[in-house]
Amino acid sequence: MQWNFQDIHNQVQTEAQAINSPQALEAFRLKYLGKKGLVTAIFASLGEAEPAQKAAIGKGANDLRGLVGGLIATKSAELNCAKTFGEQVDFSLPGTGEPLGHTHILTQTTQEIISIFEQMGFVTIETPEIETEFHNFTGLNIPIDHPSRDAFDTFYLDAQDPSSKGRRLLLRSHTSPGQVRIMKAHNPPMAVIVPGRVYRPDAVDASHSFMFHQVEGLLVDEKVQFSELKGLLTEFCKRFFGPKVIMRFRPHFFPFTEPSAEVDINAEILGIGRKKWLEILGCGMVNPKVFEAVGYPKAKYKGFAFGMGVERMAMLKYGINDIRLFYENDARFLKQF
Amino acid sequence: MKLSLNWLKDYIDPKMSTDALVDRLTMAGLDVEAIEYVGKDTVLEIEITPNRPDCLSILGLAREIGAITGKAVKNPKIKNLKTASLKKRVHIENKKDCSRYIGTLISDAHINDAPKEMKTRLASLGVHAINNAVDTTNFVLMETGQPLHAFDYDKLAGGKISVRRARTGETIVTIDGIERKLDTSILVIADAQKPVAIAGIMGSRDTQITSTTKNILLESAHFDMGLIRRASRILGLRSDSSYRFERNVNFEGVLTGANRATDVLLQLTGGHLSGRGEISSKAKSASLKVKVKISDIEFLLGIKVTPLKVKAWLARLGFKVTAKGGILTVAAPANRADIGQDVDVIEEIARMIGFDRLPSKLPMIKMTNIPVDKRPREIKDQIRQVLTAGGIDEIITHSMINGKALVKSNMAEIPAVRIFNPLNQDQELMRPIMLPSFLQVVATNINRGQKDLRLFEIGKTYFKENEKETLAILLTGRHSHDWRSSKKDMVEIFDLKGVLDRIFQTAGIDAAYEGVNMPLFDPACASKIIVDGKQIGVLGKINRNVLNNWGIKNQDIYCAGLYLDEILSKPDKYVRYQPVSEFPAIVRDVSLAVKKEIPYKKIEEICLKQGGDILRSVHFIEQYLGDKIQSGYKGIVFSCQYQSNIRTLREDEVTAVHERILQTLTRDLSAIRR
């Protein structure tokens, strides 16, 4: 039997090009490489071939097998690719895994306030919530039976103050006792921030809670001016509310600062009208009587202090209209921030 | 304090719009909280800070507006009255309690309605008209700030007045008709027999002015501020008078008030002045002189001043100033008891200039001289990051709880610090444990249809001796939905343990677990968390009956609570690099059946002990608790990884060690190879 390998090769090439389905590819494979296929037939013909021809026929069969195998591989890859292109991944389907949880908006707001002051060189110190009369009142120039206590109605505990006979321990009604503790323990210079929970027996409504959070600030050094207090708080408000914030300092009274001021921001920055002013914090120059109470030498130091309510800052910044939402912990509230 | 602008104009005309006046007052420290329109009048509600009792009157506010605007105040003409002395009819037990008392007797008075103008004035401040005598006392109180009281003189037994402490057991029926029990801490005005007024707070019903009153005894006095405040608190009784007395009234104003009221009463009642009894502890209130350095003013406010300028600012407030060698001596008016040190004067100067016109600059902040351990806050922040990354939301709950919440949580016996003066039961205890607050949050959310909850809080729990930084975590409901799998898995205890593992990894500590019996938890699923041999917390599945108490049905809840102080106080670990092995590892899987009560930890310990140098690690693969294993046993599958840092291990040496491990497990734990 004579084999025209050139013709066979041409035919194989032509047939391969026409293959457009896996079925046709399989038929092609069977035709050449199957048990009854052409390659088998060529090898089978070797027995009858002239001895001089055998080597050529053997080589021709092997070449053909290689050629067909190669074409099948190429074609198969083409057809498979076509299949993959046909079933595109839908990237609009959701990714899997746990969605992120949320830190509480009061934590976020506290962190934001603290980090602004830390960037300016303040350090953060936490002091206890259960306090003594001295730290919460007397050391801050708030005497017993004095109307300046009206602003600080206080929860007392059914527990005696071990440092003061006949006096009960109390829940701090502001973070200012932190000032007394820190100054009693350390000498200036100091620039500290005291964040934390405070308590006042107020009836609960949309703007009052018997527990809330404050951030206290205190800077003490030998030379401190009122203008620096103004400058610091102006910078803080710009960073917290935005560079366009309009503020005003108006005189106020706190027993532990003199002069004292309250700071208002103009409501315009919050998009709620230009006529309204919103109180955001209290501040002042540390009253010399407080330095005296913590045992600092007379007239050596000056300082300023400020305090703000975290809930109030968050309510203003995020448009939250009811303080109770913070402690109710409805998942739909928590997941917004 | 309410300020009627019509009334104000009797003494000063600010000559500016209401808006401008409101702004000027606010920027001078008299914060206008509300503006009210009453008929043709405009009434400002002004917040008067406790240091400024001198502003608790229309005249006081007129003086302040005069200082702000530089305009003059027209004081009402007050006659100096001369009459017979009734000094013997007044007695003061202790002049510390009452430093001045002026009783003025007006005879043959006719009690009628007050004139319309007076009634309108009072109505604008929200004061009800009663009769010409009582209205006069209220009018003069509002005008001058001096509280006054009018008695029906004929109802005073013995025609005498005594200012004394109440005696134990005494009572009084006040004008509001309520009988009040008195004690020796309360100052009263008494006649020869009984208290006829609670000093500075309210008079008695029996001695009040009525339409039949003929003779009036007008009281003008100065009582100790702390005494009035305490009595007002004890009795739960406040009045316009007590409000002013507890803030301190002006010693000089006692006489001015008495004269002004007497003058008006004589005009309105047609009575005549028949005598006055006055007792004073001193002739005149001493005016306190404060020394202020010009250099201190300039430094604190950051401005240049001259003695002349300071004098001019302070003169508007009625302060007298003398200057000598850069030091000013300032005498404030008698009604400005708040001016006691140099900074008080500096604040007044700042107020007159306007805080907004003072300079502003960034402070120079030096390195703080306080050693601060930043690690506790850093670890708390890291814990928050780990938890939120795991899909857990932070909550903030109240530090106080209702005792019933502990009972509902099977934790009634846990000692808790009690609040002495709670407003309601929800504030009666400081929480000794966080979980009841969490169950409340869960119940609320489930009621609103939110059942898949993963929550944590970092806060305090409170004890007699201290307050502890505490972390609580709660998981309930389904895992987040994976749309590729058909299963909707519910969270369970190992999800919670995994969360704890990540926290401990963050903090660089190792925790151990040991079963615990706590009525809050399901006894089969509760464990202590132990660090360095010390229990720092618990975790477990909440007991079904606790969930029933909270009305939580159809879902299990897993909770953990731990004290962070133990973690936060650990010093940061220094990590030393361990070389990575260049030689291949050999891994052998092991499948065993062991008695159910044997913890996996025990198996791992034996492996590590017997494994010697070449056992690198033991990995848990799975636990089987089904019925394809003999009863009382569980299937455990794990793998042992063998590796050396210095050479390739031979199969036979690994086999020898591995066999030794398996034999020890079989011998010591009666484990059966599967």
Image (cartoon, coloured by chain):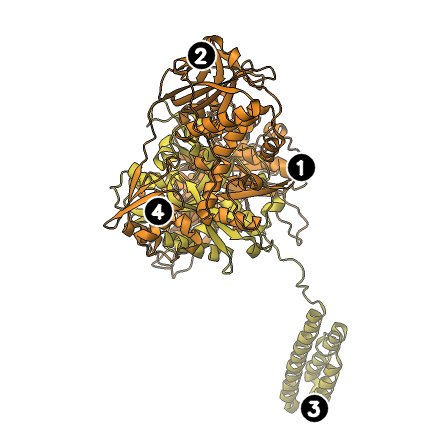
Chain colours: A yellow, B orange
Secondary structure found at label 4:
helix
Of badges 2 and 3, the one in the foreground is 2
Who's the residue at 67% across and 90% down the image? A50
Q: Are marks 1 and 2 on the same chain?
A: yes
Q: Which residue is mark 4?
A: B346
* Tag 4 near tag 1, CB within 8 Å: no
Q: Quadrant of residue B176?
A: top right
Q: Position of residue A284 (x, y in %)?
A: 39, 46
Please rate how many residues cluster around mark 4, counting C-alpha atoms within 10 Å: few if below 14, some from 14 to 19, many from 20. many
Q: Earlier in the sequence, mark 2 or mark 4?
A: 2
Q: Position of residue B68 (x, y in %)?
A: 45, 48
Q: Quadrant of residue B54?
A: top left
Secondary structure found at label 2:
loop
Q: Which one is nearer the viewer's eye here, A48 or A57?
A: A57
* Tag 1 near tag 3, CB within 8 Å: no
Task: Measure how far apart labels 2 and 3 are at the Cα level.
Answer: 146 Å
Task: Measure how far apart labels 4 and 3 are at the Cα level.
Answer: 113 Å
Q: Which residue is mark 2?
A: B160
Q: Which residue is mark 3?
A: A6
Of badges 1 and 2, the one in the foreground is 2
Of badges 2 and 4, the one in the foreground is 2
Q: Which residue is mark 1?
A: B447
Of all residues shown, which one is farthest toward the left? B325
Task: Measure how far apart labels 1 and 3 are at the Cα level.
Answer: 83 Å
